[in-house]
Image: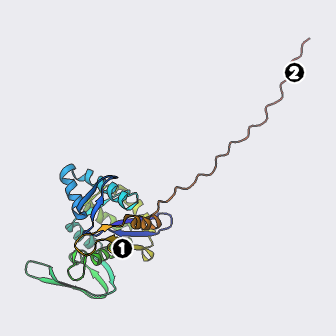
Amino acid sequence: MVVSLNPTTGAVAAASIPRDTAGFPTSSKGTYRPKINGLYQSMIGRIGQPRAAAEMKRIIGAGIGVEIDNYAVVGFEGVRQLVNAVGGVTVVLPRAVSDPYYWVTSRKRGVFFPAGTNHLSGDRALIFARTRKGDNDFERARRQQLLVAGAVTAVRSRGLANLTRLLPIASRFVKTDLPLKSAPVLFDIVSSAKLGDAQKVVFGPTKWATGGSGTSFTLKLSVVRAWTAEWMAPVPLPTPAPRTTPIPDPSPAPRPTHYS
């Protein structure tokens, strides 16, 4: 998921790249032919996690046409603990979600989320972000976007002081190049986000990708990049006021030299 936040206007945009996306460009001449959900892990094995994350920023950004400043990778346990640390996350579902095939435990199978408001604990939030057999991966990506927005709302509602609980968890379970010591500044920026007006998209067939008849497809990069150009355009830096050079006082007239 790529998320853009305009710190000046508060405008938010989120784009999800489905796991079955294949043939993603890695350079001007190369592509990653398997499904994109294996790209990050394959690079970790070759070059290590920090470099792999930096490469992911470059590859994904160049592919969809947006410069990605920072990354965050959150594992399953990180989701559980972070959601619990904010007292749970609230999401609103337009329709019920039922997945009779999801293994909750080794003995319990099947999950259900009713339409309307759902307040999710850490365990339920993780299930919410993972379940897809009841519908498909595109709906799962939309649920993940709802979960992220709900998490941001929960963090904002608890205020800046709650960061003291979140930061130790983040330092253990989140891999990121965001400077955690700058969390208060980041909190101020995120507090301006207009989540209710967010532009959200999942790049799936047939509008955003071709080859949707099987289990893999290829993005229509020109169409995808047109969307990011509209909703994730870079924010120009303020133009500094023109510098005015003070006009020096006129030089005094030369004093006449008198000769006697």
Point out the residue furthest to the left here.
Answer: 107
Crowdedness of circle 1 by 10 Å Cα count: few (<14), some, many (20+)?
Answer: some
Q: Specify whether 17 is left or right of 49.
A: right
Q: Name the residue carrying label 2.
A: 256
Residue drawn where x is 70% and y is 42% of the image? 246
Q: Secondary structure at mark 2?
A: loop
Amino acid carrying mark 2 in the image = Pro
Q: Secondary structure at mark 1?
A: helix
> In the rendered view, would you say 48 is above or below 131?
above
Q: Position of residue 158 (x, y in %)?
A: 36, 72
Crowdedness of circle 2 by 10 Å Cα count: few (<14), some, many (20+)?
Answer: few
Quarter of the figure that contains the N terminus:
bottom left
User: Considering depth in this image, is 144 or 187 the residue closer to the camera?
Assistant: 144
Q: Name the residue carrying label 1.
A: 149
Mark 1–mark 2 distance (CA, rounded to whole Å): 80 Å
User: Considering depth in this image, is 31 or 156 the residue closer to the camera?
Assistant: 31
Q: Position of residue 116 (x, y in %)?
A: 32, 87
Q: Position of residue 190 (x, y in %)?
A: 41, 66
Residue 172 visible in the picture: no
> Is the residue under label 2 in contact with that under label 1 (CB below 8 Å)?
no
